[in-house]
Amino acid sequence: MLVQFYNVSKIYPNGVKALDDISLKIDRGEFIFLMGPSGAGKSTLIKMLFREELPTRGQIFLASRSIVRMKRAEVPRLRRNMGIIFQDFKLLENKTVYENVAFAMEVVGSNRKDIRERVPEVIKMVGLKGKENSFPGELSGGEQQRVGIARALANRPLLLIADEPTGNLDINTSQEIMELLFSINRKGTTVIMATHARELVKTAGKRVIMLEKGRIVTDTPSGEVLL
Amino acid sequence: MRPGSFLYFLGQAWQSLRRNRLLSLATISTVAVSILILGFAVLLTVNAGQFMNKLESDVEIIAYLDNDLDQSRISDIKRDLLALNGVESVNFVSREEGLKKLQENFGGHEYNLKETLGKNPLPHTYEIKATNPHDVPQIAQRVKNIDGVYKVNYGQGMVERLFNVTRWIRIISMIFIVMLAAAAVFLISTTIRLAIFSRRKEIYLMKLIGSTDWFIRWPFFIEGIFLGTVGGLIAIIILSVGYSSLIDRMDALFFIPLVTNPVLLNQIYLGLLACGAVLGVLGTWVSLNRFLDV
């Protein structure tokens, strides 16, 4: 078991109840869609995985280690097991594609030799070979998201977390990004993706967790048809 | 910290200094102006302090002795004086010496005071220095009670007023310096916060990727030390050039003795330089922590 949520609730200081008694298990190698309308608690759930938010009640485990009871100093190590992909890409505009990907390895203290080997590898994996020296401003939205994915993969994460990764992209580009994420998943990385895009989810045949008002309303296993 | 990472931090700091040239310049100027004002206030205070110390240490008690004392009684009085609490030194001035001094001060060579007066009208005196000039009034009171002393003089009234004035000048200048230092911390940390704010996205990203707080802090600290030191250096260069030219000119003009002790001045300048570096780091620390809380 990779991720476990036990009776997790989150009430923000302003009184908003974002999550209400969520229990959830995610196996290694799964691909999970997290769906639901805005304000259903998708982002809160995702932020709890990398401990940007802590639950008000309940327990969360990653690989059997409690994220909730973890000390502040242990958080960096937790996050090194994860790759995060953002809706707005969050690329550094003044760095090239190569530097953006290398950045993720530099800031966790990887040595230069590893960086020189790994960065071209992941850039090739996401299909951006030849664009190493371009700046984000010179790339299309889909290419920018590929850089974001390459950066998330650089440190060989156990878990890939994607928060609306196709939210800023057109439908064709979104399909391409989905293909990339599926292929990463096939190589063994667990993927959790929050999304609004029903049409992407429908045809995928993956597990779908539907949130509404902070509760899980349906949890459809992979292979079943989503209604 | 591994030597490899230190080089990395140094490189990162240097890159950021170059990329944010305008903000770096703004921080250096802010530090320089703050330290310059602070240094000006410190020099002013040190000089005022020295001037006041000199005024105060000039205060002494003169005890006039009865005219008909024999030698052993005069020695007894000296012993009694030295036994008093807070007395630093006692200097006997015989009536002959007193007249000689008076002759030197007023008479000059063409005018013979002794012959004019006929006989020496002066009493024997003791000049008494207190360890702490502020104790002079109380000591004078006790000196007056010694048998064989018929009068004491220490500039009664004037001395108390002088001490009152110097005490207030010291308090006010300390408050002034503390306020200036607080203003400098505020100003510098605000400027640095601006610089860090422009890079908050990068910091957030580093945190989410799994960077430790110290890994993020080091380049900023190196930057803060550098900017603070350069700003401090500019300030003390302006300050020391200005002050030494002031010393050159003032010497001929005024009776007020300026502080010229090079050791003390160098200590002040080095202190101000350290102040710049410390303010740079402090400002970075204060501003950075808010962004690290992710």
Image (tube, helix red, strand yellow):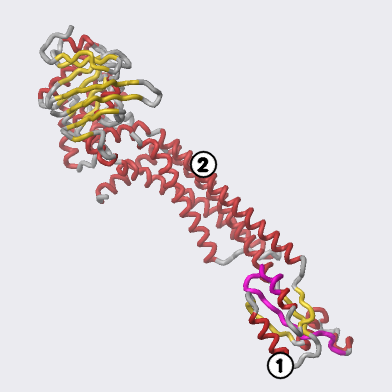
Membership of B122 in magenta stretch:
yes
In the image, taking residue A152 as reference, residue A30 lies left or right, namely left
Q: Of A184 and A112, which appears nearest the observer?
A: A184
**Residue at the location (22% across, 20% down)?**
A193
Q: Indicate whether B215 appears above or below A4.
A: below
Residue A60 screen position, x and y as percent: 22, 30
Q: Is residue A138 visible?
A: no
The numbered dot on residue B72 is 1
Q: Tell me the element at label 2.
A: helix
Q: Of A55 and A167, which appears nearest the observer?
A: A55
Q: Which quarter of the figure has residue A61?
A: top left
Q: Indicate whether B221 appears above or below B170.
A: above
Q: Which quarter of the figure has residue A103?
A: top left
Per the image, the residue denoted by label 2 is B187
Q: Indicate whether B271 appears above or below B103.
A: above
Whether pointer 2 and pointer 1 mark residues with C-beta atoms closer than 8 Å, the reply is no
Three-letter amino acid code at disc 2?
Answer: Leu
Q: Of A203 and B4, which appears nearest the observer?
A: A203
**Residue at the location (27% across, 38% down)?**
B211
The part of the chain drawn in magenta is B119-139
Question: Which quadrant: the C terminus of chain A?
Answer: top left
Q: Residues within 10 Å of mark 2 (few under 14, many from 20)?
A: some
Residue B288 screen position, x and y as percent: 39, 39
**Residue at the location (34% across, 43% down)?**
B217
Membership of B80 in magenta stretch:
no
How far, Cα to Cα, is label 2 from label 1?
69 Å
Residue A68 screen position, x and y as percent: 26, 33
Q: Which quarter of the figure has residue B20?
A: top left
In the image, taking residue B70 as reference, residue A44 lies left or right, namely left
